[in-house]
Every structure is written in structure tokens, then in C-alpha cells.
Amino acid sequence: MALSAARLAAPSVAAVAALLAFDVVRRHHKKRDEAATVARELQELLAQLKALNKTAFLVVTNSAGDAFAEKALASYAKKKCGSSAGSVLADARRLVAKLAAAAPPRASDFGPGNAARRLKHALVRGAVSPTLLAERFPAVKAAYVQQALDYGRHSRYGDRWKISCYLVVLEKWKPKIMPHAPMVDAMGDVMELCRIRFEAWYAERFDLARCDAAVMNCFLTRYRPMPDERELQKHIDGANVDGSVILALPTDAPFAGGGLKVWDGGKPPAEHDYAMKPGDCIFLDARVWHQGCPITTGERYALVLFLKLAKTP
């Protein structure tokens, strides 16, 4: 006898049970993968903290020194950062950023003939977990789309800038574009981490009690060896931008060239050349000249934040 249409359309009890079981397994694997990512980043932060400040490392870790002690970390983060963020990972990130910003300046931090003046920029190695970024890269690549933006007649690029995908966009810019939701999903928390790292660096570098940074504009840029896509020529980030972050990201197409130049310190400003690895950040004060050097092969990815600051002396 032929089955009725209703019976054909209705899933069997076994099929429903199989779907539910599959969903449970999928959720379990996702939670396990997320937990593994957090565990790896915590180990990286432990290593960074130990290199930065052994006393702090002993205060906030367990007796074996192989994991953070939650209560001790929260208490120490409150003392050093003003408050506890409420989780081990967030407190560890903030503390490492704070201590990295407070590290003694190196000889390269002073321009020739200008030894008393501190630079208005800094390179922080491993500011964001390279492991985390490597795991995010497939989602970043899948989310990336070119969103053409007109930076205006005062910009060298004008309406020819087309190699970025936006997480945050100034409302007044034209043509009006919206943040690209898949990229926000992929990198929104990394953007927030960069903002927090910048606040800690800026407050420490300029002897402020506090610095609060709001993201004005954030975009992920892909450089390729072709016209208008291979470099970002010498520039400042705009008269209304108080500070900037440049985060180096992974790539699956290794590139040649693509270093970053910064002009800072002394009169005339000294030229600083940086080869950045995934996870490295450049922090820039307002109106610091810099350049993304040309690449000749491969693809280079970077996350950039423009910030507006509220400063407490």
C-alpha cells in the first residue's frame, strides 16, 4: 500500500532522535574546542607574565606555577588595573597588557640627540595570542569582503580605498556602509582585546591614572601585490583620531615585504622599521606618521583600530 503524503513528510522518531543526538555532540565538540583555545591562551599568558614580572607571576599562580590562581589573580588585577574583569582569562589579559606597557623602555625608544623624550608609539610582541588568531583565520578569510569607502578629498586615496572589511564605521562617511556582520562575529572580541591593550599601554606610557578608549573605526585590511592593494603609503590616521592600533594577522599565502615604518622621536623624527608577526601590535599616539610597506608576493592581513580617548591625568 502506498504511504500517505503526511507520513512521507513526517520525520520518524528515530530520525528526530538522531538529529537531537547529532546536535548534542556538535555542541559538546564546540565547547571542548573553545575550552582548549582558552587553555592554550592562558598558558601563553602565563609565559608572558613570567618573562615580564616574576614577582607578579608568583603572586597570581598556583603553588606549581602552571596555572593562574583565580582569587589571587582577581585581587592582583584589581590592585594593578583598578578592577577585576570577572574572569581568569580577561584578568590575565589585562594584567599582562598592563605590565607589558610598564616595561622599562629600551634604547631604541629614544631618538638620537633626544634621550629624554619617550616615543609616541610602541611595538608589543604577542599582544594577542597567535594561537587564537590562527584558529580564527579561516573564519576571517571566509568573512572578508572588499567594502569601498571614500575617505574624502584630503586623503591620498580618496574614493579608491577598497581593500578593507569593516567592523565599526563612522556614521558620517560616504558612501554609507554597514559593519560586515560575519567579520564582526569573527573578530569582534579581538578588536575589544586590542582596545583594552591600548588603554593599558597609553595610560602607562603617558603617566595617566586612566585612559578610556572608544572605537571610532575598525577594519580588517588585505594587501595583495597589485595596484592600489600592495601598500599603505606614509600617512597619519586623521586629525580627529586620538590613537591607533595595528594588529598583524596570520595568512595562508606567505608574503614578501610588508614591513611597517614609523617616524617618531627627535627632530627630524627617526625612522623605525618593524617586521611584525601574527599577534604583534603597533600602538600609535595621535598624528604619528607611519607606512605599510609594499608586498611583492602573497597576502598580508592586518586589523586596524582608530580610537577616541578620554584621559584622566
Image (cartoon, rainbow, N blue to C red):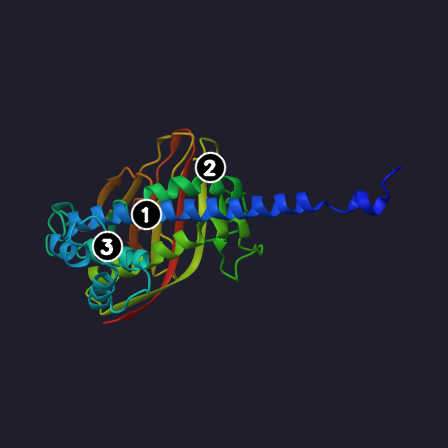
The residue that mark 1 highlights is 39
The residue sitting at 25% across, 45% down in the picture is 125
Element under disc 2: loop
Nearer the N terminus, badge 3 or badge 2? Answer: 3
Q: Residue 287: x, y in percent? A: 32, 56
When asked about the image quadrant of residue 217, the answer is bottom left
> Could you say which disc has been placed on residue 229 in the image?
2
Q: Is residue 31 above or below residue 79?
A: above
Give the amino acid at mark 3: Phe
Q: Residue furthest right?
A: 1
Q: Residue 117: x, y in percent? A: 15, 56
Element under disc 3: loop
1 relative position to 154: left or right = right
Is residue 155 among the parts visible in the rendering? no
Q: Residue 308: x, y in percent? A: 37, 63
Q: Which class describes the residues within 10 Å of circle 2: few (<14), some (14-19), or many (20+)?
A: some
The residue that mark 3 highlights is 68
Real-space Cα distance between discs 1 and 3? 11 Å
